[in-house]
Image: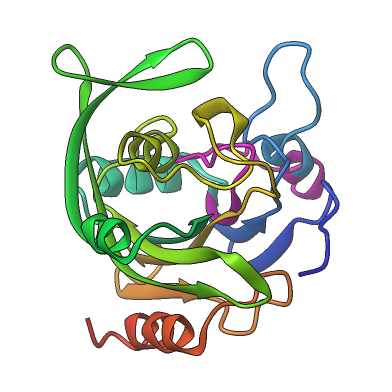
Amino acid sequence: MPREKLTDITVIRETSDDVLLIKPAGLASERSYGGDQSAVHLLQRMYPEHHVRLPHRLDKVTRGIMVAALSDEAIQFHGQEIREGRWSKFYLARVHQRSRRMMQSLLGEHRAYIRRDGPRAKIVHSGGQPAITTVLAYERAPNRSHDVHLLISIATGRYHQIRAMLANLGSPLVGDDLYGGREGRLYLEHALLRMRDFTTGEQITVFRRDDPRREDIHDRLSDELNRLADGDA
């Protein structure tokens, strides 16, 4: 997978009200005070006549699909859709290969309560926000003999949700120092999004089948993503 530059925002589709894009890993969604440039900062330069706002965010370490609103009506619409749970989000992640029994235990739905604690998210028994993460499938990672890719769906969008929950399940992302992942290059991608289009009101699927910067994944995972994109699940 070619390395992306922080300025490598790829616009998938744009209208007068919103933009669908791919954010590279390493680029923050929004710039914190005194921080580096962000996706919002770059988009604002691309669309200077609009007030760019984000109805959702991706972690800085995460690449993949984002939606940016360019109008008051679009930010209200997408925000309401998210609050009502109408977005379906699918991710690819890479973890260290464990025993077959442990990998099998990752499959299925996992529920937890998450509370933000500084730069980390903590799994707590009470006082946190409910989070639902489902591991749909896993396959060995091509050219990485000790790693596997997971296909994940999330029904909530909590801070560091996938990273914290996988670590709690004993399988942190490779390279995720914050959550105890072993040394290596971190990979987490928001690969597919089902949402309602603001302009038409129709259900659409946002997915780049041949993304040149996606990590190589096993054919069976690729087939599963294509099946999801075709609406067969």
Residue 183 visible in the snapshot: yes
Residue at the (64%, 60%) spot, across then down: 22
Residue 91 is situated, as x and y percent measured from the top left of the image, at: 44, 60
Residue at the (19%, 47%) spot, across then down: 110
In depth, the one of 19 and 174 nearer the eye is 174
Residue span colored magenta: 43-67
**Which of the 4 image quarters holds residue 146?**
bottom right
What sort of colour scheme is used for the picture?
Answer: rainbow
Question: How many numbered discs, if any?
Answer: 0
In depth, the one of 182 and 70 nearer the eye is 182
Residue at the (74%, 40%) spot, across then down: 44
In depth, the one of 98 and 108 nearer the eye is 98
Residue 149 is situated, as x and y percent measured from the top left of the image, at: 49, 66
Seen in the picture, residue 53 relative to 155 is either above or below; the reply is above
Q: Is residue 62 magenta?
A: yes
Residue 14 visible in the snapshot: no
In the picture, measured across the screen, residue 104 lies left or right of residue 39, that is left
**Which of the 4 image quarters holds residue 156?**
top left
In the picture, measured across the screen, residue 154 lies left or right of residue 29, that is left
In the picture, measured across the screen, residue 188 lies left or right of residue 112, that is right
Q: Main secondary structure of the magenta part?
A: loop
Residue 134 is situated, as x and y percent measured from the top left of the image, at: 24, 56
Q: Quadrant of the C terminus?
A: bottom left
Residue 1 is situated, as x and y percent measured from the top left of the image, at: 76, 70
Seen in the picture, residue 229 relative to 185 is either above or below; the reply is below
Q: Is residue 11 magenta?
A: no
